[in-house]
Amino acid sequence: MGGCVGSHHDSSGSLNENSDGTGVALGRNQPLKRERPKWKSDYPMTEGQLRSKRDEFWDTAPAFEGRKEIWDALRAAASAFESNDHLLAQAILDGASITLPHGALTECYDELGNRYQLPVYCLSPPVNMIEERSEELDGSDPDSGAADPSTCSGSDTAGGECQLRLRLSTGRDLRLAVRSTDTVGMMKRRLQSHEGVPASTQRWFFSGRPLTDRLRLDQLNISRDYVVQVILSQPPPPEPESTPGVTPEATGSVAVETVLEPMRVEN
């Protein structure tokens, strides 16, 4: 599947300054190049198949040698890179002290000299991508996505509630109860009310393309078990001590789901 990781360090734990045979010293760092890699899949794949292939890699990547926080940073950087947000991708790499000897995410190193390799299918779609036909699902087939209550495609009944799978750039997965008539902007505010993440800091992506606030959910054709990526432009601040009468929105903290029981006052 690719993405194997090795280590290149000397006795001090720093990157080797020796060339790996390509003429580029491993200890050097180059800025992230803007060119997206072009590649052809062994078989024509749909966006859903590509997304599943990526999810499989990212779900297993931390099991390889390397540090989980670096894998999380690389995942967020790869998502920003595919969305042509190079400034955000570079900022993520710099913040995690990740070096690119070739200026590409296909080969990266952390500050300890551990090597990380990202497959090209995590950085760009193949040139032989084929279009999905999710819009043809009419719900007559019990195995179709339209018949599944977790499906959030355009074939849902108007205003019907469904569970939308979200994957935050912090590495957390969650399900958000939404309606098919909700816009992306409304869903951002709904996520804010549940998690305390300001809507203005959220950037939503599906199948590698950014979702604008005016798009409605029933226009996105998001089928069963598909994941919407949510990139946070800034990490959420640590949760302060709770103060009576102060809401999470007022303090800017991240809300934690807590069930509050009513207080009983004894006479």
Image (cartoon, rainbow, N blue to C red):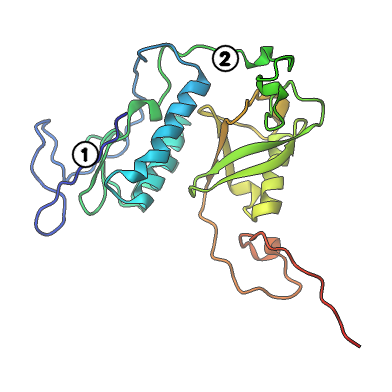
C-alpha separation, residue under disc 2 versus residue under disc 1: 37 Å
Residue 139 visible? The answer is: yes
Please state, as top left, top right, bottom left or bottom right, where the N terminus lies in the image. Answer: top left
The three-letter code of the residue at mark 2 reads Glu
Q: Residue 55 in the image: x percent, y percent?
A: 45, 34
The disc placed on residue 132 is 2
Q: Residue furthest right?
A: 267
Q: Residue at x 60, y 45 (%)?
A: 174
Sequence-wise first label, 2 or 1: 1
Residue 13 place in picture, x, y as percent: 15, 57
Image quadrant assignment for residue 185: top right
Q: Nearer the viewer, residue 223 or 191?
A: 223
Question: Between residues 112 and 211, which one lies in front from this camera angle?
Answer: 112
Q: Could you say whether the residue bearing mark 1 is in a helix, strand or loop?
A: loop
Residue most toward the bottom? 267
**Which residue does the image show at 73% across and 38% down from the upper left?**
178
The residue sitting at 72% across, 31% down in the picture is: 149
